[in-house]
Image (cartoon, rainbow, N blue to C red):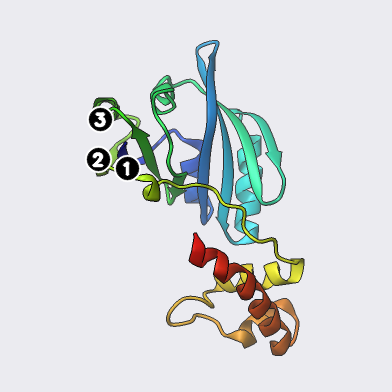
């Protein structure tokens, strides 16, 4: 199977515009599409990365956009049905193409991963994108190469964490506890959660004991 990876700045996408307004990374999982009344309706699942208030603002603006025909929010993920007038999206969601990884939308750019058994179909996608200079003023081709199953993203069910462990772990990720060098220590996390250092340390250790074996395997 052949894989095409590219990055574009999409001036018309409601997602990319919102990532400029809010400091949020939007991972879009394309599910399906259909055409009705000369519009392309795209069903997608979104998983967000960022501060809670930024994500909340992103969701509120997304829900109010006139292109959004259906919107469901379960807290962790958002499901949208978007109506696009550009038939270009029909090309990206063609039945002969596959999406081995989610679309990463960040800082006004989209990174797409598209696969096919036919290299010529992917070459056709590149040629079409290059024609749409007004819509995509910036286009970067990263990869057009063969891939194997190890390179294809398969969603896995992660261990479910109790509320406090999840809160501590998510906070530690956002604040840079796991970066090198660390941007925050246990004391900073404890102050933010309004608990003792020993309590936040216990939450993190229990969360890590469940998550690390999962990450090591997948």
Residue at 59% over, 40% down: 45
> Would you call the spot at circle 3 few (<14 residues within 10 Å), some (14-19), or many (20 or more)?
some
3D distance between C-alphas at marks 3 and 1? 13 Å
**Mark seen at residue 101:** none
Q: Position of residue 96 (x, y in %)?
A: 39, 24
Q: Position of residue 54 (x, y in %)?
A: 60, 56
Asked if residue 200 lies left or right of residue 35, the reply is right
Asked if residue 75 lies left or right of residue 172, the reply is right
| Front in this rendered view, residue 195 or 59 | 195
- The total of numbered circles placed on residues is 3
Tags 1 and 2 touching, CB below 8 Å: yes
Above or below residue 209? Residue 80 is: above
- Residue hosting label 2: 144
Residue at 43% over, 79% down: 180
- Residue hosting label 3: 119
Q: Position of residue 134 (x, y in %)?
A: 31, 29
Q: Identify the mark nearer the N-term, 3 or 2.
A: 3
Tags 3 and 2 touching, CB below 8 Å: yes
Judged from the image, the secondary structure of the residue bearing numbered disc 3 is helix
- Residue hosting label 1: 5
Residue at 57% over, 52% down: 156
């Amino acid at each position: 199977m052949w894989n095409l990876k590219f990055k574009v700045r999409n001036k018309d996408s409601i997602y990319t515009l919102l990532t400029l307004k809010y400091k949020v990374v939007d991972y879009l999982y394309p599910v399906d599409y259909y055409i009705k009344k000369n519009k392309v309706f795209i069903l997608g699942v979104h998983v967000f990365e960022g501060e809670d208030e930024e994500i909340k603002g992103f969701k509120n603006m997304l829900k109010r956009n006139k292109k959004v025909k259906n919107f469901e929010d379960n807290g962790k993920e958002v499901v949208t049905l978007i109506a696009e007038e550009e038939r270009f999206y029909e090309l990206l969601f063609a039945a002969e193409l596959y999406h081995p990884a989610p679309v990463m939308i960040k800082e006004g750019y989209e990174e797409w991963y598209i696969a096919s058994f036919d290299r010529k179909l992917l070459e056709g996608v590149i040629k079409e994108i290059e024609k749409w200079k007004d819509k995509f003023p910036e286009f970067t081709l990263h990869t057009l190469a063969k891939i194997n199953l190890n390179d294809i993203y398969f969603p896995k069910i992660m261990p479910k964490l109790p509320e406090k462990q999840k809160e501590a772990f998510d906070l530690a990720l956002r604040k840079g506890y796991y970066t090198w060098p660390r941007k925050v220590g246990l004391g900073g996390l404890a102050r933010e959660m309004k608990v003792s250092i020993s309590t936040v340390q216990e939450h993190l250790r229990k969360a890590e004991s469940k998550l690390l074996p999962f990450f090591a395997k997948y």
